[in-house]
Amino acid sequence: MPAFDLPLPELEHHRPEPAEPADFDAFWSGTLKEADQRDPLVSAHPVETGLRLTETWDVTFRGFAGDPVRAWFSRPSGVRKPLPAVVEYIGYGRGRGLPHERLTWVNAGYAHLLMDNRGQGDQYGDGGVTPDPHAAAPGGPGPAVRGLLSPLDYHYRRLITDAVRAVTAVRALPGVDPARTVAVGNSQGGGLALAVAGLVPDLTAVLVTAPLLCGIRRALDLTDAGPYGEIAAYLSVHRGVEEAAYRTLSYMEGVSFARRAHAPAHFGTGLRDTVCPPSGAYAAFNRYGELSGGVDPRKEIHAYPFNGHEGGEGEQVRRQLQWLPQQLTG
């Protein structure tokens, strides 16, 4: 697929004003206040993985509405001092899989929490184990359209709340330095990490690659791929409900979360990405931190002209591994 979005010089100055609802902050503060009424952790049980250099626990924490959400928590074996924690969010349709599949961050010396996606896990990888008991709201079979016509019912209200609660949960686990907590994600995971950056004011850093839920209205006009295509397909059948859908999506817009973020940020995007168009990543990057109270967060973005949704793959991770220690010691 050739480059299909804006040319790079235009992307570098792409700063669209998000169609932000007046009660955006009240909506999310109310949602999170309700979730915060419960202790985060339910259980943490050690598991045998066959990995001699990594210790892993099967964690359950309370997410949206107190629902149990599963995660893998891993630390380098034999290290007892409190470690910075990397909370990782995964892509659309994936579950947490098996604990030996994602070892980058624990091998780099961090405590690592990998959050399961509620109501997902059946499309890729090795599955998930977290149901979504609220998924009956009208909207369609795919997570991107479940409850689409009401922000109170929408799947991503629940998933974003889970993502915020994952940070609260990891800070309560032993062997974690709660003052050094990082959010990481690619694709849907990138969108969740960006939402966390906008909703958790004391996050230490955020690493976002090919983020979903950024520049949503433009993405719906540009692509029929992936989750955006599911939304378009739903609207092609349920004609006349576009404004209700757009209103719901405006509460999930990554650019709005990015505006409110404080933490240093590392972005990446492929300029041939038809799943999460690069204009969304640049819109979030260019507006990142503009409502952070006069603080100008450190931020950088890396564009990969000949890459699609895979972004920079290993090269992007290499850059993340070099960048993150600077933020933790700065």
Image (cartoon, grey):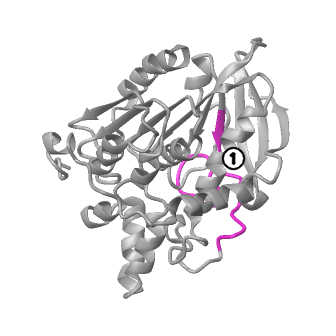
In the image, is 6 to the left or to the right of 41? Answer: left
Residue 120 versus residue 238: which sits nearer the camera? 238
Horizontal and vertical percent position of residue 22: 46, 66
At a point 63% along the width and 44% down the height, the residue shown is 96
With respect to residue 234, does 328 lie above or below?
Answer: above
Q: Which residues are magenta?
A: 113-135
Position of 320 compared to 120: left or right?
left
- Label 1: how many Cα within 10 Å (few below 14, some 14–19, many 20+): many
Rendering coords of residue 52 (x, y %): 73, 16
Q: Position of residue 10 (x, y in %)?
A: 15, 45
Query: Which residue position is annotated with label 1?
Result: 165
**What is the magenta segment's predominant secondary structure?**
loop
Residue 180 belongs to magenta span? no
Label 1: state its secondary structure: helix
Task: Work out whether residue 116 can be spotted.
Answer: no
User: What's the residue type where badge 1 is placed?
Assistant: Arg
Where residue 112 sits, quadrant-wise, is top right
| Residue occupying the point 78% across, 13% down | 80
Is 143 left or right of 250, judged from the image as shown? right
The answer to whether residue 124 is magenta is: yes
Q: Residue 8's quadrant in the figure?
A: top left
Q: Position of residue 303 (x, y in %)?
A: 26, 34
Q: Residue at coordinates 44% horizontally, 24% vertically from top-left?
A: 320
* Front residue (pair 36, 154): 36
The single residue placed furthest to the front in the displayed view is 294
